[in-house]
Image (cartoon, grey):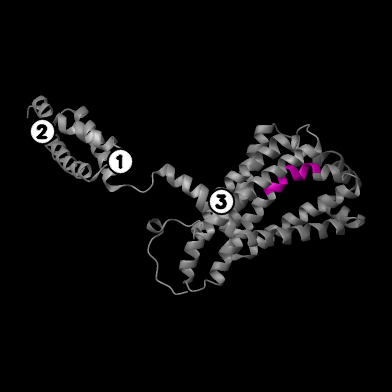
């Protein structure tokens, strides 16, 4: 085959196909012409491949056909648009659906932490049993608690905190089907925070405790509560699947909750930055707590303004139907 002659004969058709592909709005006759030119160009490409034509021309026509095929099939979403859709619809809807589970986990933790804090105050024997000698307690209160936040450089500390908390959140969700590990984890965390808080408050270091815990803790603990709520919701999907089979219920909620785990990675990244750079900074206590409060407010506005309407419209955080696979029809 004389490739140059072949190109000279059909170049005008390929140029026209490029024009149609680049046209934003096609009328009926242009759409029909696009189909015809697509088919002809596909035949041309096949003939050129059989003749082992020059690779540059083959690549050029292959790319043109891919673009034309995408225009003809009208692909619903690009990968980037899927990310945007999930970030603005699916994920906030999943967070919003967890709001009562999150509230329950938060209430359980706060009550247990307060009870633990009150219990440790005025009980020297319990303090000695849990924290060691008076010297150990003095060191914890005077230096160790505060020193923890400045032990490493800011970037390294933020990275360590982020990876650790992201792993904890993912583990909470992954083990949520058993139910008990979630309650155990919340209890351990609540008691630990309550005991240390009570000890510092008793020794007149309450302002230091709240000044170091609240800036990052407001968002970080909220993320932990969301993860715990996601795990408990997954557990409940197994206990009470409703009209769905247990396998359907677990699959549906499991996919949505794994998406929540990925979303919490971003939330905990922000929390880690605050803990690494804001908490140990020289800013006044009110300013550091203000930064943490603004981060928490931004999270809940994200859930409220984007999540509530998306959930009301039927978004759950699960995959689209075409990706989620077939399910057995159910009633109710």
Name the mark nearer the viewer: 1 or 3. Answer: 1
Coordinates of residue 26 in the picture (x, y in percent): 27, 42
Instruction: Specify the label residue 306 is tagged with.
Output: 3
> Local crowd at mark 2 within 10 Å, few (<14), some, or many (≥20)?
few
Q: Which residue is mark 2?
A: 51
Q: Vertically, is 201 above or below 109?
A: above
Q: Which residue is mark 1?
A: 25
Can residue 290 be found in the magenta stretch? no
First in sequence, mark 1 or 3: give its number. 1
First in sequence, mark 2 or 1: give its number. 1
Image quadrant where residue 289 sits: top right
Q: Vertically, is 246 above or below 80?
A: below
Q: Report helix, strand or loop for mark 3.
A: helix
First in sequence, mark 2 or 3: give its number. 2
Residue drawn at (64%, 40%), measured in percent from left and top?
160
Residue reaching furthest to the top:
4
> Local crowd at mark 1 within 10 Å, few (<14), some, or many (≥20)?
few
């Amino acid at each position: 085959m004389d490739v140059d002659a072949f190109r000279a004969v059909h170049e005008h058709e390929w140029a026209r196909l490029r024009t149609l592909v680049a046209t934003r709005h096609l009328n009926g006759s242009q759409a029909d012409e696009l189909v015809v030119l697509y088919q002809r160009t596909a035949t041309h490409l096949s003939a050129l491949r059989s003749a082992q034509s020059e690779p540059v021309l083959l690549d050029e026509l292959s790319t043109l056909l891919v673009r034309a095929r995408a225009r003809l099939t009208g692909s619903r979403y690009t990968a980037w648009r899927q990310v945007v859709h999930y970030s603005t619809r699916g994920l906030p809807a999943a967070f919003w659906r967890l709001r009562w589970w999150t509230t329950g986990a938060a209430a359980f933790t706060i009550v247990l932490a307060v009870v633990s804090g009150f219990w440790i105050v005025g009980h020297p024997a319990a303090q000695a049993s849990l924290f060691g000698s008076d010297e150990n307690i003095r060191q914890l209160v005077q230096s160790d608690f505060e020193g923890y936040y400045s032990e490493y450089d800011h970037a390294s500390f933020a990275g360590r905190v982020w990876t650790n908390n992201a792993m904890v959140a993912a583990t909470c969700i992954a083990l949520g089907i058993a139910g008990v590990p979630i309650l155990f984890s919340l209890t351990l965390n609540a008691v630990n925070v309550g005991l240390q808080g009570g000890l510092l408050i008793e020794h007149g270091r309450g302002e230091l405790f709240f000044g170091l815990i609240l800036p990052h803790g407001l968002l970080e603990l909220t993320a932990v509560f969301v993860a715990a709520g996601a795990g408990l919701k997954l557990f409940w999907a197994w206990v009470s699947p409703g009209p769905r089979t247990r396998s359907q219920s677990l699959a549906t909620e499991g996919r949505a909750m794994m998406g929540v785990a990925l979303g919490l990675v971003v939330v905990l990244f922000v929390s880690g930055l605050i803990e690494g750079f804001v908490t140990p900074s020289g800013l006044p206590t009110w300013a550091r707590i203000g930064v943490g409060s603004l981060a928490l407010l931004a999270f809940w506005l994200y859930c409220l303004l984007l999540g509530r309407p998306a959930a009301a419209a039927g978004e759950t955080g699960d995959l689209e139907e075409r990706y989620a696979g077939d399910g057995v029809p159910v009633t109710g």
